[in-house]
Amino acid sequence: MINTAKEFVLQRICIFASQVFDPNSDSQVVNILKSKFNIRLPQRRSMNESLSSTVSDHEIIALILKYRSMNES
């Protein structure tokens, strides 16, 4: 059941981005946010910290963080 939820979150992320990409890839996330949404992430110790600090900028950031947290379980 967790895979279905994860796939649903991934589908929503890709719909926002209008393309398929890997939310676990730091470089792909940075490129998508910059090119599609004009969001530049601040420098932090980790990518998740950078995303967390800009989570209010766009709904896709919250979805990426949710997707990444699903990998930890």
Image (cartoon, rainbow, N blue to C red):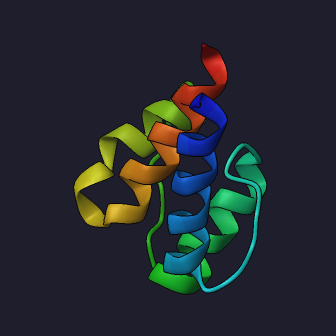
- Rendered location of residue 24, percent (x, y): 72, 43
Q: Residue at x 76, y 55 (%)?
A: 22
Residue farthest top in this picture: 73
Q: Nearer the viewer, residue 73 or 60?
A: 73
Q: Is residue 63 left or right of residue 53?
A: right
Q: Nearer the viewer, residue 62 or 6?
A: 6
**Image quadrant where residue 15 sits:** bottom right
Quadrant the C terminus occupies: top right
Q: Residue at x 49, y 77 (%)?
A: 16
Q: Is residue 39 left or right of residue 47?
A: left
- Rendered location of residue 30, percent (x, y): 64, 60
Q: Is residue 54 above or below residue 12?
A: above
Residue farthest front in this picture: 1
Quadrant the N terminus occupies: top right
- Rendered location of residue 12, percent (x, y): 50, 66
Q: Is residue 19 left or right of residue 57?
A: right
Q: Is residue 50 left or right of residue 33?
A: left
Q: Residue at x 53, y 42 (%)?
A: 5
- Rendered location of residue 67, percent (x, y): 55, 41
Q: Nearer the viewer, residue 54 or 73?
A: 73
Number of callouts? 0
